[in-house]
Image (cartoon, rainbow, N blue to C red):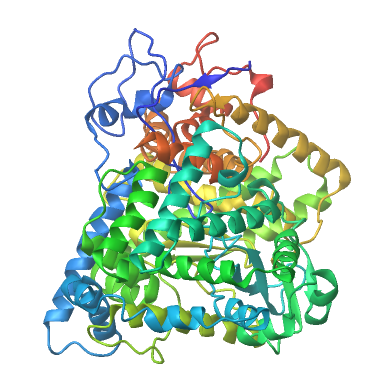
Amino acid sequence: MKTCWTLSKTAVALALCAGLLPAASAQDAAQVKGPAEKPAATKTPAMTVLPGEDFFTYANGDWLAKTEIPADRGSWSAMGALAEETNARIAKMIEELGADKATSGEARKVADFYAAYMDEAGIEKRGLAPIKPMLASIAGIKDKAALVRALGASIRADVDPLNATNFHTENLFGLWVAQGLLDPSCNLPYLLQGGLGLPDRAYYLENNARMAELRTKYQQHIAAMLKLAGMDKSDERAARVFELELALAQTHATREDSANIQRSNNVWTAKEFAAKAPGIDWSAFFKAAGLSGQERFQVYHPSAVIGAAKLLADADVATWRDYLAFHKLNQYASLLPKAFADQRFEFNGKTLSGTPQQSVRWKRALGATNAAMDEAVGKIYVARYFPAENKARVQAMVANIIDAFSRRIDKLDWMAPATRAQAKAKVTSMYVGIGYPERWKSYDGLRIVAGDAFGNTVRAEEYHYQQELAKLGRKPERTDWAMPPQLVNAVNLPLQNAMNFPAAILQPPFFDPKGSDAANYGAIGSIIGHEISHSFDDQGAQFDAQGRLRDWWTKEDLAHFKAASGKLVAQYGAYKPFPDLAVNGQLTLSENLADLAGVAAAYDAFKTTPNGKTVEADRQFFTGFAQGWRSKAREASLRRAVLTDGHAPSQYRTYIVRNLDAWYRAFDVKPGQALYLAPQDRVRIW
C-alpha cells in the first residue's frame, strides 16, 4: 500500500541522529473518530485518533495540544526539554564554581570562560578591538600566495562526517582526524568541503521562490555585517562574496553523495594534490595548516577540493579578502558588540529557522563553554549528577539488547553462513561507552584569561585543532568518545565499532531507574537498539568488526539487503511534510534502517524480562517509543531539516512500527487503517 502523507504547516517534530538529537517534522494528520486505547506509558486523556491511523498523534496528542515551541527555538521535543533542564543545572553549577574562590584547575578555567562570555558590558566596551588584528591580517593579503597561506591557517577540526554527520564549516575546508577507511592502524586527516554561509548547496542552487528569497536576504546579511565593521560599499562587496560562495556551492557534493562512503573513499598523497587539484600551492597551504609533514589525506569531497583550487587559480584577491572578513565577523558575532550578534540572529535565527527570539545569554554562554572545554564540563557534571547504579542498570540493558540483536542475526533465513559469521563477530565485539569516557581530555595547555571572551574562544579552537593534529602520529584509540557526558544524545562510531551513551540522556523521560521495563526499553532501549543497528545500516554494514571499510557480504546477501532497503526508501519517500516537499528516502535511509532494526531488537530484549509477557506491556513499550519522539517545529526549521538532515521528521520516525508484526497485535491494527501495511509489504531486514 503506497500512501502520500501530507501535513499542515503548524506543528513539527524533531528526529534522532546517528548521534541522535532530533531534526524536525510536522504533526497534523487525519483524525478518525472512534475509541482509542489509552497509552499505558503515561496517563493522558483518551484521544480520538486510533493507533493504526496516526500512531504519533495517538501517543502524543495531549502533549502536542498543550505544548508551545519556546520563542528562542526553531523546534521543541522531549530531548530538547531534557537538554534545557540539564543545561540549567550545569549553568548553575558553573556559576557556583565561579563564585567560590577555592575553585582551581580545569574547573576555574570553565568558570572563567563562562563568566567572560556572560560579560556583555565588557564585550560592548571593547568593541571591535579583539577582532581588529584578525581583520587587519586579512586586509594585508595582497596576492594569491598570501591568500593561500591565510586559507590554510584558517582550517580547524570542526566537522565530523561519520559520527555526527556534521558537514558544515564556514572555513574553506573542514578537517576531521580519524582512522583511515581502509587501514584501522593509523589516523588520517579527512578533508571536507566547506566555505558556505548558508546550510547547504541546495540553498544556492535550487530554483524556487523561497530559496531565491533566502539568497536575497543572505546577501543583505553579508552587507549588514560588513557595514557594521565599517567597510564601505558593503552592498557591492556582499554581491561579490555571494557570487564566490555560489561558485563554491556548485563544486560541492550533495548530501546524498556525502552519505555515500564509497564515493568519499579517496586517499591522496600530499604530492598528488598539485596534479589532481591544480590552482593552489598545496605545500604552502598545508604548511600554514600545520600539516606539512602529513603524507596522506582522506579527501572526502574531491569535487569541492578540485573546484576550490580552480577558483583560486583565477582568484580576485579583493573578493576573497571580503569573503574572509565576513566569515570571521559571522563566526565570532556573539563575542562582538550586540549589534553583530543581533544581526547574525536576524538572519540565522529568524530567517533560516523561523525562531522569533534569540536565546538568553546564559544559554549561549553554556553552549560556547561546552564547545571550548566539553569534557572539563562533563567531568564536573558526572561527579554531581550521574550515580554509579544508573551506569550498571544501563550496561545490563545494553548487553540484553546486543544479545537480542545477535539472536535476530541467527534467525535470518536469507543470510549465508559466511556473512552471518562476520555480522556476529561485529555485534559481539562492539565497544560500549556508558555515561562518560574511560580517559578524560586534558586542558592543561589551554590558556583561559578572565574577561577575555574573544581570545578565550580563539585559543580554545586552536587548542582543539592542535590536539587533533597530534593524533596523526598515533594509533587510533577505540575507546575515545565523540560526545561529552552532558549531551542529551547517543552515537554509533563506525570506524571504532563502538557506541557512546552520554550520562545526560540516561535520565527521565528516556531512562528511569525506578521505571518499568516497558517504559525503559521503549524509550532508552529503542535508542540503544538504534545505535547498535547503525553498525548494520546501509553505511555501517560496509565496515567490518575492526572498523575497516570492507565488503564482507556475499553477492546474494548484499543484493537482498539492497532490495529490502529500497522498499524502505520508497516507504519514506511517500511522506510529505508539505505539499511541495517530500522526505528524501535515500538521504534518511541510514537512520530509518537503524530505527527499524533498533526497535525490533529492543522489543525482543524487552520480551525476555519478567514484565514483558502481556499485551498491555507491549502497548506500554510501543507508546513509550513514540513518546520519546514527541516534538514540534516551525515551518522554516522543518524545511531546513528535510533538505539537510539525514533523519526523517519525528512523526514519520514513529511510523517505523508499521513494519513490525508485534505492533499490529498490540493495538489491533486492521486493514483499511492509514498505517496498515499488508504482511508482504512490511520491510524486514535484520
The number of callouts visible is 0
Q: Residue at x 46, y 57 (%)?
A: 490
Q: Position of residue 394 (x, y in %)?
A: 40, 58
| 101 or 200: nearer the viewer | 200
Residue 274 as seen in the image, left or right of residue 580? right
Residue 665 as seen in the image, left or right of residue 183? left
Q: Position of residue 531 (x, y in %)?
A: 54, 52
Q: Residue at x 42, y 45 (%)?
A: 352
| 657 or 362: nearer the viewer | 362
Query: Is residue 343 among the parts visible in the rendering?
Result: yes
Quarter of the image where one finds residue 228: bottom left
Q: Quadrant of the C terminus?
A: top right
Quarter of the image where one finds residue 371: bottom left
**419 above or below 116?**
above
**482 above or below 411?**
below
Q: Residue at x 66, y 70 (%)?
A: 190
Residue 203 as seen in the image, left or right of residue 117? right
Q: Position of residue 240 (x, y in %)?
A: 56, 58
Quarter of the image where one finds residue 620: top left
Q: Residue furthest right?
A: 555
**369 above or below 8?**
below
Q: Quadrant of the N terminus?
A: top right
Query: Is residue 439 among the parts visible in the rendering?
Result: no
Q: Position of residue 107 (x, y in %)?
A: 26, 83
